[in-house]
Image (spheres, rainbow, N blue to C red):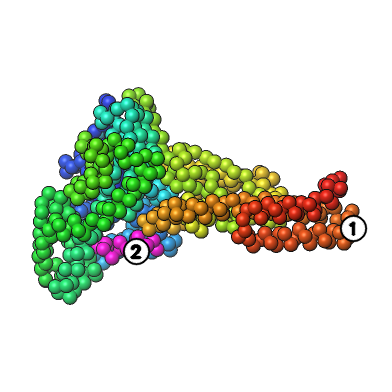
Amino acid sequence: MSIGIDLGTTFSCVAYYQNGQVNVLENENGCRTTPSVLAMTEDGDCLIGQHAKDVITKATSSLFDVKRIIGRRFDDVLLQRDMPLWPFRVEKDTDGTPYLQIQNDAKKVKFSAVTVSSLILKCLKENAERKLGVEVKSAVITVPAYFNATQRRATEEAAEMAGLKVLRILNEPTAAAIAYSLKGQRFSRRNILIYDLGGGTFDVAVVNVEGPRITVKAKGGDTHLGGQDIDNIIMIKIIEEFKRRHGMDLKGNYRALKRVRKSAETAKITLSASNVARIELECLHLGIDLTMKITRSDYESWIENLLMATVIHVERAIREANLKKSQINEIVLVGGSTRIPLLKKIIKASFDANTKICESIHPDEAVAYGAAVMAAVLTGVEEVQDMRLIDMIPMSIGIQCNRDYMSVLIKKGTVFPCFKKKTFINSEDFQTLINVPVYEGERVLCSHNRQLGEISLPIHPKKRGESVVDITLEVDHNGILQATALDLNTKKAITTTIVYDHCAFTQPEIDEITSQSEEDRLFDETFRLRYKQLQKSEDMAYDYKHRLEKIRGSVDREKYSNLMETVEREISWLSGFPKVPPSDYIHRRRTLRVKVYPTLFLNLSFY
């Protein structure tokens, strides 16, 4: 049996496809979603789900928000921002990755984010087996669209540790689009917008649905924006109010923080249905109680900027899909945070009155529903074999050449799985190693983009242009990137899975990169033209230099010296990559050709 799993930041959901329909599984408590929480009892037993969330013996004995930690480095800015609000400790491991620490009596227990995720997945798997009465061997597991290669691979590893074969790592908005396409929405052709605001992440996708054919036209999002951020805003307001009244900071009191977080989450849910939420916390800190009232108007003023930030992603995705807002037929709201009344007002105000908001998709279950359908497709279930899913690369991927130039191999919007190959030569005489840094982004300069990783290949030392290397970049079904470098002279090759040296783009970085791609298009185009002319000029100059060296004995010494000096002077000038118009490079090549080529032509027999 294969299942679909929505492994969420705050809640997880499991579904399966059988007899032509999708069923969402209930857990042992009769709930269709399970809290993504782990806790340890005083006896050392691990609890998962609602039991773990309810444990109150020690605030430092439970772990949550693991999806915000998995695949990240300890020094990540977003991780550091969240840490003061968690009641558990996050420490730096020897390899720079974070580990989570549970305090159980006098004993400290360490967990990696992968281990915690695997225990949650194992719990979901075992519950499914109890409910279905069969062994569950494989699953489609969903992740945010903007999860990077490290985060995707870490999720795969967690599933493997839980005893699950991963059929596919599926983007969450894509899974929601699959759910939409099978929920009786088989229209001739429709453009839909998936708006997925979950507990910890935000995804948006513009998808074209035509019967069983689903084409992702554009996508965007923020791996660190969701309902937990709303909880954090309310938490901070409660902490600030306590400090204002009593002059005491709660941030070091982990037990108090856990109670404040639970009250913040409850207040958020209450304010989606009521105009007032009351916070009542007895003996919160040093025997001091806290009672406060939060009105919906205050609450909405606190979170409005956060919700408006999602609209920027929505508008950008529509532009990248080459559509207008009026061409969006329907909006599918996914994720528990989409129940917030202010959010629905903002979304409706951002679109035409004719654009419908889909009410037939359950916001908490849509992603698991789509994952279950994809699991059925991948395991050969006949009823769904007509489904065709076309997904795309969210940002261009390329490698760094000299002068910081980014040579794009896989363009933004390319359908994956895919692979692209380009041939490169050594840029210096007698190189013994070629380093190939791999970047993601839309700018012409790598320094304006984001490094994903690097591959290094030893090569046989030869003169410039004589060592030839094929670079291949491949993105598989799960969106994981592999790079291969092949020395065509020695036939030696090296392949590596490219992982992010740091973490996914932060929201300010995404905004900066995207806005620069629009504002500085002229700069990028000018640089490209100049760089291409520089390459041609350098190729000619080095070619002339090597050919002159070969005919040295057959040319008058003074003439040889003058010609070589002319060529080396040109190489020296080019090494500074002068900021001159591309036409200047063309003119100088013509001049160099007039001076040097006649002598080379007269001595063709020497090379």
Tell me the residue that label 1 is attached to. 556
* Residue 58 in view (yes/no): no
Q: Quadrant of residue 416?
A: top left
Which residues make up the magenta segment?
Answer: 75-88
Disc 2 marks a residue whose amino acid type is Gln
Estimate the x, y position of residue 208 in percent, counting from the top left: 35, 34
Seen in the picture, residue 67 relative to 252 is either above or below; the reply is above
Q: Secondary structure at mark 1?
A: loop
Estimate the x, y position of residue 381 in percent, counting from the top left: 34, 26
Estimate the x, y position of residue 217 in percent, counting from the top left: 39, 38
Q: Which mark is residue 505?
A: none
Residue at (73%, 51%) from the top-left corner?
590
Q: Secondary structure at mark 2?
A: helix
Seen in the picture, residue 156 relative to 251 is either above or below; the reply is above
Seen in the picture, residue 497 relative to 4 is either above or below; the reply is below
Estimate the x, y position of residue 128 in percent, counting from the top left: 26, 38
Residue 231 vs residue 101: left or right? left
Q: Nearer the viewer, residue 115 or 334?
A: 334
Tell me the residue that label 2 is attached to. 80
Q: Nearer the viewer, residue 606 or 262?
A: 606
Mark 2 or mark 1: name the one nearer the start of the chain: 2
Q: Within the magenta stretch, is there residue 230?
A: no
